[in-house]
């Protein structure tokens, strides 16, 4: 049985080697099915999948809790079941957003498999539920379940290709073009309603797209001539064809 340990009070940092000490609930059947359906787990044997789940627990975190810190060794494989998580890096007093992870997605798999230090940190952007599978259990099952091992290789390959696309996007496009393409992609993810609701602060979006908050504001103003309106956390697309003509989407950069 998998348990969700409810966080006792607001903590700004998770000590990942210690399990929480408060009330317990069982994982919902719908969540279990979503996790089983992930490409990482879908083809592995039922007994090995159950071994992973029996060792795991589901943790609920409030907003802005640091889950992992770059430079530390991984204790768990994390799976975002609900909410959102920001992956970020820091150096010499500066921070940058590397990615934003939404349900149902794992992070950071490469460090877990290699038993190597994290190259990124992670914190919740919104209240979140995270399934945590002990890293050693993941490595043990990886060593004997061929289907699971193939799925891990495929996922790591997909992540590598995603990094290449991200680098091309950053190096070959202007900041305004990156923003325009992000708006088109976010609209597609939210159902093509031409109305996007940001689930996080604009400064996080700016960092994710490699620009300052001031540059984000200027770029939103620039995109007004291509049919984009912004108010608070809402972005409206009034002329999708004009925006797409400016953005020039490219499957070799946008996935």
Image (cartoon, rainbow, N blue to C red):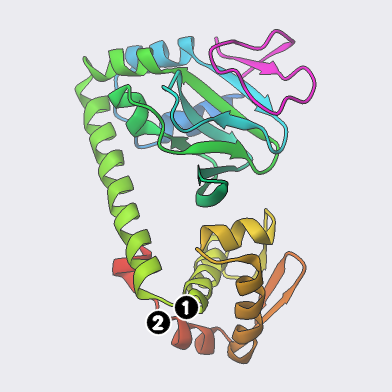
For residue 128, side relative to residue 142 (left or right):
right
Q: For the stretch drawn in magenta, what is the main secondary structure?
A: loop
For residue 122, side relative to residue 232 (left or right):
left
Residue depicted at x 53% and y 51%:
97
Q: Where does residue 42 sit, x and y in percent of width and height?
A: 35, 31
Q: Where does residue 228 sit, x and y in percent of width and height?
A: 64, 82
Q: Which of marks 2 and 1 is in front?
A: 1
- Which image quadrant: the C terminus? bottom left
Q: Are marks 2 and 1 in contact (CB under 8 Å)?
A: yes
Give the quadrant of residue 13: top right
Residue depicted at x 23% and y 36%:
153
Was residue 9 drawn as part of the magenta stretch in this picture?
A: yes
Q: Name the residue under label 1.
A: 177
Please tell me whether mark 1 sits on a helix, a strand or a loop.
helix
Residue depicted at x 67% and y 26%:
60
For residue 239, side relative to residue 25 (left or right):
left
Q: Where does residue 132 sit, x and y in percent of width and height?
A: 51, 22
Is residue 16 visible from the viewing direction of this image?
yes
- Which image quadrant: the N terminus? top right
- Part of the protein shown in magenta: 1-27
Q: Is residue 131 above or below residue 245?
A: above
Disc 2/disc 1 C-alpha distance (Å)? 8 Å
Q: Mark 2 points at which residue?
A: 248
- Which residue is most to the right? 9
Please tell me whether mark 2 sits on a helix, a strand or a loop.
loop
Is residue 41 visible from the viewing direction of this image?
no
Near mark 2 (Cα within 10 A), the count class, few <14, some 14-19 or many ≥20, is few
């Amino acid at each position: 049985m998998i348990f969700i340990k409810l966080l006792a009070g607001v903590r700004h940092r998770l000590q990942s080697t210690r399990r929480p000490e408060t009330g317990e609930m069982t994982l919902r059947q719908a969540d279990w099915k979503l996790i089983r359906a992930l490409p990482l787990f879908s083809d592995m044997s039922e007994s090995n999948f159950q071994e992973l789940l029996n060792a795991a627990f589901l943790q609920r975190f409030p907003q802005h809790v640091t889950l992992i810190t770059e430079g530390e060794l991984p204790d768990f494989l994390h799976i975002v079941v609900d909410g959102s998580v920001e992956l970020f890096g820091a150096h010499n007093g500066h921070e940058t957003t590397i990615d934003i992870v939404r349900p149902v997605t794992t992070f950071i798999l490469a460090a877990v498999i290699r038993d190597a230090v994290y190259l990124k940190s992670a914190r919740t952007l919104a209240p979140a539920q995270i399934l945590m599978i002990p890293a050693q259990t993941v490595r043990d099952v990886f060593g004997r379940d061929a289907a699971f091992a193939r799925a891990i290789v495929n996922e790591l390959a997909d992540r590598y290709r995603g990094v290449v696309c991200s680098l091309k996007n950053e190096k070959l496009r202007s900041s305004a073009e990156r923003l325009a393409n992000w708006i088109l992609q976010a609209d597609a993810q939210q159902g093509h309603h031409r109305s996007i609701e940001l689930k996080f602060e604009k400064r996080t979006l700016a960092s994710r797209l490699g620009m300052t908050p001031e540059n984000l504001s200027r770029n939103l103003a620039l995109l007004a001539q291509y049919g984009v309106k912004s108010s608070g956390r809402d972005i409206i697309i009034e002329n999708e064809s004009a925006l797409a003509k400016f953005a020039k989407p490219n499957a070799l950069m946008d996935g």
